Amino acid sequence: MYNIGMILFLIGGLLIGGAAVAFALQNTTMVTVALFSWRLESSLALVIILAMVLGALIGFLWLLPGSIKKSFQISNLKRQNIKLEAELANKKTEVKSVVNE
């Protein structure tokens, strides 16, 4: 079935996300966000949602190189495993031929 940890993680994420959305919807006042010469004037709800999306995107991009590296390592290990299994099969046939002689 499903991993219980993954289900709990999903439920926790949904609860936190729901609480953040509820907070954002209750805070619709206008705010100004300034970064260097760039300025954004928008509702607090939109600023919070944008910050959450930006944080999730940065987190995804942060984890991406490690995931790609692990994917390459897994494919190399699978190739090595196939090679070693073939070598083992050859050695087993050699042993059988020596034992049968």
Image: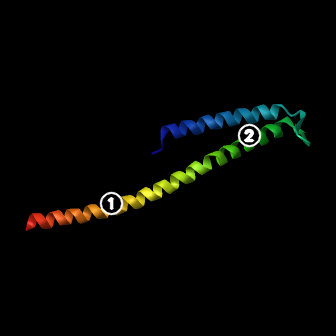
**Spot occupied by residue 10 in the image (x, y as percentages of width and height):** 59, 39
Label 2 sits on a secondary structure element that is: helix
x 71%, y 41%: residue = 55
Q: Mark 1 points at which residue?
A: 84
Q: Seen from this angle, which residue lies furthest left?
A: 101
x 61%, y 34%: residue = 12
Q: Tell me the quarter of the image containing the N terminus.
A: top left
Q: Left or right: where does residue 30 sit relative to residue 47? A: right
Cβ–Cβ under 8 Å for marks 2 and 1: no
Q: Left or right: where does residue 40 sit relative to residue 19? A: right
**Spot occupied by residue 79 in the image (x, y as percentages of width and height):** 41, 61
For badge 2, the amino acid type reads Met
Image-quadrant location for residue 46: top right
Front: mark 2 or 1:
1
x 92%, y 42%: residue = 37
Q: Left or right: where does residue 5 sit relative to residue 37? A: left
For residue 52, the mark is: 2
